[in-house]
Image: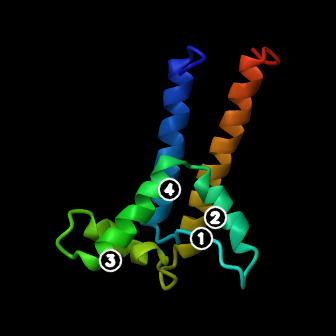
Amino acid sequence: MMLKRPKRAIAFFVCIVVLFLWGLNLGARIWHYEPQQPLTFFAMVSQTGVGVPYFAARAVASYARNHSDFSLYDFASRFNFGEGNIKAITFEYGNTFTWVAGLLNFLVILDAYDIAMRRKE
């Protein structure tokens, strides 16, 4: 949006948010760093790349765990309140969707930087 390319910004925003939410709906896990399993760092960084939706999903998951009358309780229960629904056949697909959403956002950031520096049209 800041580069005066609203169509491009809206298209990428919609793609990234839909990919992330679709992944959560498929039962993905919201990853956080666990020192005993160092590779979880990469999963966390890729999901964190989504930005605000990642932190909002973490907040919704932790709040809904203790409040069954919460309006987003059903959504949070689909991904087991942040732990992922490993019993779901779509668990790995959901994780992949959320990772791709964050990594796509990193690529969009690099693309916007190249456009701002006039290295790319």
Residue in the picture at 32% in, 66% down: 75
Quadrant for the C terminus in the image: top right
Q: CA distance from mark 3 to mark 1?
A: 17 Å
Question: Which kind of residue does numbered mark 1 sit on?
Answer: His
**Where is residue 120 drawn, in percent x and y?**
79, 18
In this rendering, the count of numbered labels is 4
Q: Earlier in the sequence, mark 3 or mark 1?
A: 1
Q: Residue at x 42, y 60 (%)?
A: 57
Label number found at residue 54: 4
Say which element carries label 2: helix
Q: Is residue 62 left or right of residue 27?
A: left
How far, Cα to Cα, is label 4 from label 3? 17 Å
Q: Amino acid at mark 3?
A: Arg
Q: What label sits on residue 44 in the rendered view?
A: 2
Residue matched to label 3: 65
| Vertical order, 81 against 21 (above or below) | below
Q: Tell me whether circle 2 and circle 3 mark residues in contact (CB < 8 Å).
A: no
What residue is drawn where x is 66% and y is 78%? 34
Residue 65: quadrant of the picture: bottom left
**N-term-proximal mark, 4 vs 3:** 4
Q: CA distance from mark 4 to mark 2?
A: 10 Å
Callout 4–callout 3 Cβ contact below 8 Å? no
Q: Secondary structure at mark 1?
A: loop
Q: Is residue 4 left or right of residue 80?
A: right
Q: Pinpoint residue 91: horizontal percent, then vertical percent.
A: 54, 74
Mark 4: amino acid: Tyr
Amino acid at dot 2: Met
Contact flag, marks 3 and 1 (Cβ < 8 Å)? no
